[in-house]
Image (cartoon, rainbow, N blue to C red):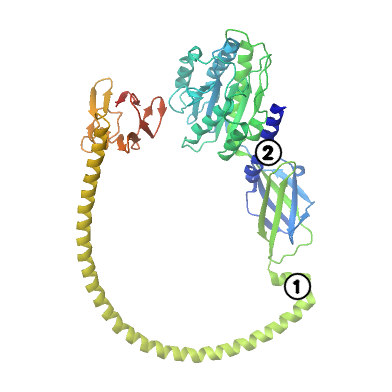
């Protein structure tokens, strides 16, 4: 009963968040064409990659806060001839890797299938990353990237697969933390600066550890929708399979959900038949991710009733049937209000127009006579005012020069005083921080080594820089992979912090590529072939 109640609550939250985040999933994607008015045409963008016909929408004209249904509708898909399989993409492949006898076949099959598929879907310029996942490791992370960066180098990807050993996984439980793994994957994709369509391919048994999961599929779907990331899934499908994953994960993020044919899953090696099937599905799904990220565009044409070419503001509401998606937009009818009145009420409009024309002629004559008198008076006043302005301008310019000279001297005095005070304050603060560093014990040591050199650096100031340029750094490092000013170590309060100075090669701290991180005793910083170890 408790489990059923939990599922009910989760499904309600999923529907609620989906409604909030998907309101913008359809929108008018072009200006409204009114050349054939009262027939109007416009493009509708739908985030769903599957084309929706006119029977999938309801159209309403908003008039006096009432919705009036429009029945005369036609829609055609805007043709798209692009070969999306050749377009660049950013894909994270998440492979479930469990060191359990029940999963040896699955792990080997998926790894071999990915390796063989790489040449079929990796294009120059793509960003591909392969990572494994299982359960939480050290309560810090779930996924384990097999190589450093997203890449289009097939050999790098193959080597990463072949160098991975699933038997090193100490956790042997036959379930995985799927929601948490996908959320970590989304965060990885968000960090990629390239503007490629981004997606995740989940290769797993889709058996979630429902008793220890820290994240829900509601969080996953909401996060993926917010970041416009497509999630695709391929399930291994063992015969003793139990569903612990959310079946609408792919559908709600506009991805594809595939299932391999069922097997016992007890082989101690790759399953050749399922491997071939997995290769075909992996290739098809990944080559389709760009297209599924783009959505569809349809040209809608509506024929309106009881409307006039009066230039008035018109409001149209589009609702997608059986979904929360909607879009409301405003356009202006052709023509103008005046001629629109002729169309609605011709005889009263003509009579009123004649009266207005006579009144305008009389008013115009009176205004013109008064303007001529005022113009002559203004010319005389302007001549006198110009004489006074010239005299005042000369006096003001003289006063300005004198004031500017005084201000300049005063500013020079202030600048000199401020510079002296700032230097004194900086030196005083630095002395205090050094005293605090000493109070914690010996100064920290940063040991360095690469293929050619080794050295040790004492961190004896609160702010010390490291880099290749000896003129701008506290410590000079002779290594071509190190930037001119690569990183900084700061002491604040009672701890040390390392900060990347927008370097070319970045930093990998304890296995993670980071821009900044607190430093603890024994932390290892890697920059290409150079290694730094921090000791307190």
Q: Is residue 237 left or right of residue 372?
A: right
Question: Total marks drawn?
Answer: 2
- The x, y position of residue 494, in whole percent, is 32, 35
Residue 342's disc is 1
Residue 15's disc is 2
Q: Is residue 252 visible?
A: yes
- The x, y position of residue 19, in whole percent, is 66, 42
- The x, y position of residue 416, in whole percent, is 19, 57
- Gap between marks 2 and 1 measured at Cα: 51 Å
Q: Residues within 10 Å of mark 2 (few under 14, many from 20)?
A: few
Q: Residue at x 27, y 24 (%)?
A: 448
- The x, y position of residue 474, in whole percent, is 22, 35
Q: Residue furthest top?
A: 268
Question: At numbered mark 2, what does the secondary structure look like: helix, strand or loop?
Answer: helix
Q: Is residue 127 above or below residue 326?
A: above
Q: Is residue 348 above or below residue 315?
A: below
Q: Is residue 333 visible?
A: no
Q: In terms of depth relative to the viewer, which is nearer, 72 or 147?
A: 147
Q: Residues within 10 Å of mark 1 (few under 14, many from 20)?
A: some
Q: Quadrant of residue 203?
A: top right
- Quadrant holding the C terminus: top left
- Quadrant holding the N terminus: top right
Q: Residue at x 41, y 24 (%)?
A: 511
Q: Is residue 437 left or right of residue 51?
A: left
Q: Nearer the viewer, mark 2 or mark 1?
A: 2
Mark 2 vs 1, N-terminal side: 2
Q: In terms of depth relative to the viewer, which is nearer, 520 or 337?
A: 520
């Amino acid at each position: 009963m408790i489990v059923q109640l939990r599922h009910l609550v989760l499904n309600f939250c999923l529907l609620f968040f989906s409604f909030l985040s998907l309101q913008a999933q359809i929108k008018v994607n072009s200006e409204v064409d009114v050349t054939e008015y009262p027939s109007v045409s416009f493009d509708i963008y739908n985030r769903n990659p599957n084309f929706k016909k006119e029977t999938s929408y309801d159209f309403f004209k908003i008039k006096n806060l009432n919705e009036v249904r429009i029945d005369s509708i036609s829609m055609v898909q805007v043709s798209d001839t692009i070969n999306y399989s050749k377009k660049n993409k950013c894909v994270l492949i998440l492979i479930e890797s469990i060191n359990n006898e029940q999963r040896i076949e699955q792990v080997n099959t998926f790894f071999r299938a990915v390796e063989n598929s790489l040449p079929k879907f990796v294009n120059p310029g793509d960003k591909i990353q392969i990572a494994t996942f299982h359960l939480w490791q050290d309560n810090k992370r779930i996924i384990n990237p097999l190589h450093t960066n997203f890449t289009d180098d097939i050999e790098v990807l193959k080597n990463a697969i072949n160098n991975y050993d699933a038997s090193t996984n100490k956790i042997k439980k036959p379930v995985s933390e799927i929601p948490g793994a996908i959320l970590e994957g989304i965060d990885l994709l968000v960090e990629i600066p390239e503007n490629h369509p981004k997606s995740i391919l989940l290769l797993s048994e889709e058996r979630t550890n429902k008793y220890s999961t820290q994240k829900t599929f509601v969080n996953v779907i909401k996060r993926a929708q917010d970041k416009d990331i497509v999630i695709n899934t391929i399930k291994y499908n063992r015969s003793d399979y139990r569903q612990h994953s959310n079946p609408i994960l792919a559908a709600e993020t506009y991805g594809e959900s595939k299932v391999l044919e069922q097997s016992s899953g007890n082989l101690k090696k790759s399953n050749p038949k399922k491997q071939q099937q997995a290769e075909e599905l992996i290739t098809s799904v990944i080559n389709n991710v760009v297209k599924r990220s783009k959505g569809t565009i349809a040209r809608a044409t509506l024929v309106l009733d009881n409307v006039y070419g009066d230039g008035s503001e018109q409001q149209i509401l589009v609702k997608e049937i059986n979904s929360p998606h909607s879009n409301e937009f405003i356009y202006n009818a052709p023509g103008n209000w005046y001629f629109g009145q002729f169309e609605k009420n011709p005889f009263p409009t003509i009579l009123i127009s004649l009266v207005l024309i006579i009144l305008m002629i009389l008013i115009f004559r009176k205004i013109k006579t008064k303007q001529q008198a005022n113009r002559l008076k203004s010319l005389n006043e302007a001549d006198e005012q110009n004489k006074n302005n010239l005299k005042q301008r000369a006096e003001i310019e003289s006063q300005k020069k004198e004031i500017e000279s005084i201000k300049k001297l005063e500013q020079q005095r202030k600048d000199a005083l401020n510079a002296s005070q700032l230097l004194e304050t900086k030196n005083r603060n630095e002395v205090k921080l050094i005293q605090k560093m000493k109070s914690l014990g010996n100064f920290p040591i940063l040991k360095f080594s690469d293929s050619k050199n080794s050295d040790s650096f004492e961190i004896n100031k609160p702010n010390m820089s490291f880099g290749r340029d000896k003129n701008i750094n506290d410590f000079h490092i002779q290594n071509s992979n190190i930037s001119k000013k690569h990183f900084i170590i700061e002491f604040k309060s009672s701890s040390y912090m390392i900060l990347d100075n927008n370097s070319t090669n970045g930093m990998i701290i304890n296995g993670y590529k980071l821009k900044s991180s607190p430093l603890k005793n024994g932390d290892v910083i890697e920059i290409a072939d150079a290694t730094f170890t921090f000791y307190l």
